[in-house]
Amino acid sequence: MQYVTSSPWIHKQQTGLLLTVQTTKAFGAAVRLLREKSGISQENLAERADLDRTYVSGVERGVRNPTLRIIEKLAVALGVSSVKLFEEAARIQKKSSTKG
C-alpha cells in the first residue's frame, strides 16, 4: 500500500476541516454568550428552541454542526436574528484568530 504524504488535496482537506472546527466553535461561543446575556439556562434555551439540552450543550461546545433550521430555532429562542448570531460568531472567530 502506498501513502501520499505531500499532496495539495490533503492540505486543502485539512485546512477545510480546521476552518469548520473554528467556525463551529465560534458559533457555539456566540450562542453561549447571547444565552448568558439573556440570563437563561441551557435547559431553558433548549425548551424555547424545541431542542434537547444535550444538543444545545454540544452546539455551545462546538462539537455539533447545526443546520440552518436549528440555527433559526436558536436565534428565535434567544430573541435575535440568525444574522446577529452569525455576526457575533464572526466577531468571536476574528478575535480568537488574532490571539494566536
Image (spheres, rainbow, N blue to C red):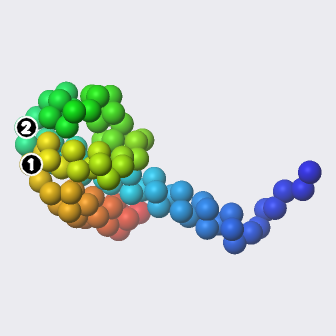
> In the rendered image, is residue 95 in sight?
no
Tell which residue pokes out farthest to the front in this image: 69
Badge 1 marks a residue whose secondary structure is loop
> In the rendered image, is residue 73 in sight?
yes
Q: Which residue is mark 2?
A: 39
Q: Are marks 1 and 2 in contact (CB under 8 Å)?
A: no
Tell which residue pokes out farthest to the bottom in this image: 8
Q: Which residue is mark 1?
A: 79
Q: Earlier in the sequence, mark 1 or mark 2?
A: 2
In the rendered view, does 47 fall on the left or right side of 99?
Answer: left
In percent of width and height, residue 53 lies at 27, 28
Label 1, label 2: how far apart the Cα atoms are: 12 Å
Quarter of the view holding residue 22: bottom left
Task: Say what amino acid the circle numbered 1 marks.
Answer: Gly
Image quadrant holding the C terminus, namely: bottom left
Between circles 1 and 2, the one closer to the viewer is: 1
In the rendered view, does 56 fall on the left or right side of 48?
Answer: right
In the rendered view, does 82 fall on the left or right side of 70?
Answer: left
Crowdedness of circle 1 by 10 Å Cα count: few (<14), some, many (20+)? Answer: few
Say which residue appears at 29% left-offset and 36% top-offset.
Answer: 56
In percent of width and height, residue 81 lies at 15, 57
